[in-house]
């Protein structure tokens, strides 16, 4: 929001209105507006609020026309010599960027939210960079460039890990909303288990893989899990950890939590390193994860997340999923893994 107000104010106070100043003012307003409302939606989604009820009319086709409109508005600002028209165009850029920021982030499936966060971080850097040009402040330009480029690189890396293009994340949705509305949900039954059974299953296993998710962080269960891992290793039971590239709510969040809990680096593996080991695994404990182990990504070509790489935990001999309830994850997609014959649900706090 600071970038938006600063850009409009700087344009109104500027006397010369050079093309560089016009372009910097427009980019500062436009990118700053997208970052502001986009960050609000991202916070609401990650806090567990359902924002689907606040969809804009024709939201699934609105992004491209609004973007094209702002390109034309920028060209008009450059060729115009009217301060009043320029101020009106910048004000219009602020309004449309607020709408774009809300609509883009709200249209992004929550499984894409870690990517959306890095994209928004990148946007904030480019807005700062534009302010640097506008205010002739090299420090703002340099710092903004570093933030913007690092966020863009991280976004690209994460998109590759999720088999998604950055274009689809920004301008597309996981699925056509009309297709979702017409798809019927099947009534399926899950199998629940108890802590006592879980203890027995762990003791009788020789090869265990733990898949941590955001629920582990919320429940602050990394400490107890580290203690269990230490005890099992002393008894000759192999316990490893499988980390999905976008597990948690920020890239690397779970790696940091496991490291802080004292879990050795040599038992923590990335998805591509450990996915092939699940068929030889006696027990998989999914701790507070959902979307990153959703089997519909590989088994259902009509799924909204079809093609997304996931941890193939269902290939193990036994899977126990610990989560608070049977509710869907942040992607708001049902998980067929919950109903597989080798899956047991341990409902409750991860700790």
Image (tube, helix red, strand yellow):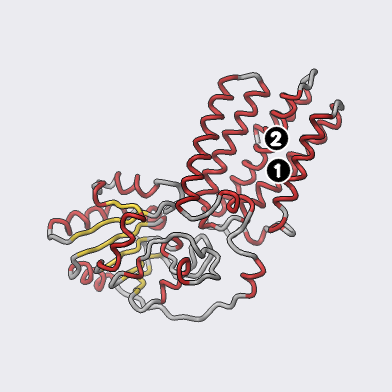
User: Between 233 and 21, which is closer to the camera in this rendering?
Assistant: 21
Sort mark 2 into few (<14), some (14-19) or many (20+) by Cα contacts within 10 Å.
many
Q: Could you say which quadrant of the image residue 210 lies in? A: bottom left
Question: Do the CB atoms of the residues marked 1 and 2 lie less than 8 Å apart?
Answer: yes
Give coordinates of residue 63: x percent, y percent: 70, 51
Q: Quadrant of the C terminus?
A: bottom left
Identity of the residue drawn at 58% across and 78% down: 184
Q: Quadrant of the N terminus?
A: top right
Identity of the residue drawn at 42% across and 61% down: 310
**Secondary structure under the numbered disc 2 in the rendered image:** helix
User: Between 294 and 250, which is closer to the camera in this rendering?
Assistant: 294
Q: Could you say which quadrant of the image residue 70 lies in? A: top right
Q: Is residue 176 placed above or below 139 in the rendered structure?
A: below
Give whichever of discs 1 and 2 has the lower sequence position.
2
Sort mark 1 into few (<14), some (14-19) or many (20+) by Cα contacts within 10 Å.
many
Identity of the residue drawn at 51% across and 39% down: 151
Q: Which mark is residue 29?
A: 2
User: Between 94 and 309, which is closer to the camera in this rendering?
Assistant: 309
Q: Which mark is residue 97?
A: 1
As measured in the structure, the alpha-carbon distance from the residue carrying label 1 to the one carrying label 2 is 8 Å
């Amino acid at each position: 929001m600071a970038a938006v107000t600063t850009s409009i104010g700087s344009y109104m106070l500027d006397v010369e209105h050079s093309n560089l100043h016009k372009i910097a003012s427009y980019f500062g307003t436009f990118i700053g507006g997208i970052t502001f409302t986009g960050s609000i939606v991202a916070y609401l989604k990650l806090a567990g609020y359902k924002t689907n009820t606040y969809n804009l009319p024709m939201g699934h086709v609105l992004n491209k026309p609004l973007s094209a409109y702002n390109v034309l508005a920028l060209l008009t600002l450059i060729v115009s010599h009217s301060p009043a028209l320029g101020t009106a165009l910048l004000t219009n850029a602020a309004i449309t960027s607020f709408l774009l920021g809300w609509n883009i982030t709200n249209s992004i499936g929550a499984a894409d939210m870690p990517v959306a966060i890095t994209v928004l971080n990148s946007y904030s850097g480019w807005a700062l960079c534009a302010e640097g040009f506008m205010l002739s402040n090299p420090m703002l330009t340099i710092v903004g460039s570093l933030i913007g480029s690092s966020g863009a690189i991280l976004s690209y890396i994460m998109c590759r890990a999720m088999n998604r293009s950055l274009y689809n994340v920004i301008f597309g949705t996981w699925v056509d909303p009309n297709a979702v509305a017409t798809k019927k949900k099947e009534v399926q039954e899950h199998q629940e288990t108890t802590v006592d059974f879980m203890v027995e299953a762990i003791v009788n296993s020789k090869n265990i893989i733990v898949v941590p998710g955001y629920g582990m962080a919320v429940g602050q269960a990394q400490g107890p899990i580290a203690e269990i891992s230490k005890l099992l290793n002393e008894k000759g039971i192999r316990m490893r950890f499988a980390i999905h590239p976008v597990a948690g709510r920020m890239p690397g969040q779970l790696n940091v939590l496991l490291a802080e809990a004292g879990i050795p680096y040599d038992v923590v593996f990335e998805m591509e390193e450990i996915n092939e080991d699940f068929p030889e695994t006696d027990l998989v404990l999914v701790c507070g994860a959902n979307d990153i182990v959703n089997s519909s990504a590989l088994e259902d070509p009509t799924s909204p997340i079809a093609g997304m790489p996931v941890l193939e935990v269902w290939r193990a001999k036994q899977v126990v999923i610990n989560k608070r309830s049977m509710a869907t994850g942040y992607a708001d997609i049902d998980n067929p893994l919950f109903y597989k014959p080798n899956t047991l649900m341990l409902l409750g706090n991860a700790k």
